[in-house]
Image (cartoon, helix red, strand yellow):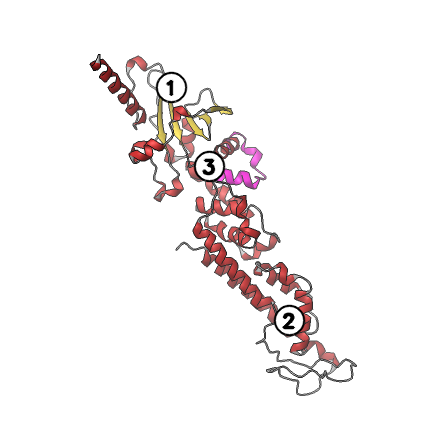
Amino acid sequence: MAQREDEDVAHKRAVQQSALSWPPRPSSPENSGMASVFTTVLCDPTNTPRYKRQLTPDSEPRDKQAKRPRLDKVALRKHERFWLADGNAVIELDGISFRVHQSWIAKHSKRIAAILPDKGKEGGRLEEIILDFRGALKAIDFEALLLFYENPGDYRDYIETPTLMSLIRAATMLGFDSDRVWLVRELEGLWPSNLGELFVNPEPRIDAPEVASLARTCNIDALLKPAFYDMARAPGFGLERLDGSEQISRADVLRLVRMREYLSDTWSQVAAHEDPTFVCQNFRDAPSSNGEGPSSISEDVGEKPALCPIPSASMDNNCLSATARRDAWVRLVHHSDIFARYRYDPLRGLAALVNIAWTDDWCKDCKEKRKADWHKMQGRIWETVGEYLREE
């Protein structure tokens, strides 16, 4: 009896080992009429160098294998739409089972095709493969990808941003590389990294954290600057919108903190008051309150008074005193709420300064010079934002 029990235990172990092995062992003749089920576990390709795949649980340490939940203990439900009667590849995600065709997956993903068994049939037997993407793919993303391939014409003109991000995640994780290229291009068009196209959205976009997380997860560098800039100018960086599977790393949170400090300091230096080092070469004195002569306000140190009276016809070619310009600056920048509104958004703040209807307190040459300087400053700020996002 003891010998019989030992043989039963040995047989069970052999069966379990066969189910976990890859490639699958040939089935015996007596089982040739039944579907043979094999499981391969595919890890998140974005977390491994060069998208190396973990093909079986045997490559994990034993203690981690013990903690991995067994597939047969999880209550799975078949997807209402994508459980194909003639499918031979089962994908289990978030408690949902999808059954699709191996040929479809192999056609779009060379990476998955390389680990699938021979697609031929032996004696009419249907080989069913269970692909396990736990931790690498969500059911909602895979469902979006299946819907996309089922009716591609529905997505010809426009794809909503959440759907587009789901498609990119699924295409990246599954290795649908050719389709991923144009999907990423579509999202980059909605989130331009070109400074000249940045000012289309005056307010921070609420989905910036999701886009930033996607950019990190799927290695889309072009999305980092616009997404992180929108986060830096949003209250709380918008991080409360992220769920458990979409997180920003601690290193990126620190980058956001430093970036916001830089943006705030830069804006304060530019907009709190007029540049005190600026000296107009066309300086003229402000008229007195009765309009009969120069103002009684003394010249600021460093200002250059006109050497001779200025004819009224050329008044727009000369600046008023620093005191007059300072008062005008307060009216135009602070009283209009521009200074407070762009506290963490100097790029749009500088654009607002450029578009202000500057009064005759500044001469024409000074107005043009200031606008040119502010345009150059926008470029320097945008370059600095990119430097904050470089991996250390």
Return the x and y of residue 263 as percentages of the image width and height: 53, 61
CA separation in Å, label 2 and label 3: 52 Å
Dot placed on the residue nearer the N-terminal end, 2 or 3: 3
- 261 relative to 3, above or below: below
Taking the spot 75% from the left edge, 85% from the top edge, the residue there is 293
Taking the spot 50% from the left edge, 53% from the top edge, the residue there is 225
SS class, disc 1: loop
Taking the spot 66% from the left edge, 87% from the top edge, the residue there is 307
SS class, disc 3: helix
Q: Residues within 10 Å of mark 1 (few under 14, many from 20)?
A: some
Q: Which residues are magenta?
A: 148-169
Return the x and y of residue 288 as percentages of the image width and height: 75, 81
Front disc: 1 or 3: 3
Give the side of residue 16 with respect to residue 365, left or right: left
Taking the spot 28% from the left edge, 25% from the top edge, the residue there is 17
Return the x and y of residue 176 as percentages of the image width and height: 43, 37
- Determine the main secondary structure of the stretch shown in magenta: helix
The residue carrying mark 3 is: 170
Can residue 56 be seen here? The reply is no
The residue carrying mark 1 is: 126
Q: Residues within 10 Å of mark 3 (few under 14, many from 20)?
A: many
In the rendered structure, find residue 367 and report the number of the disc placed on it.
2
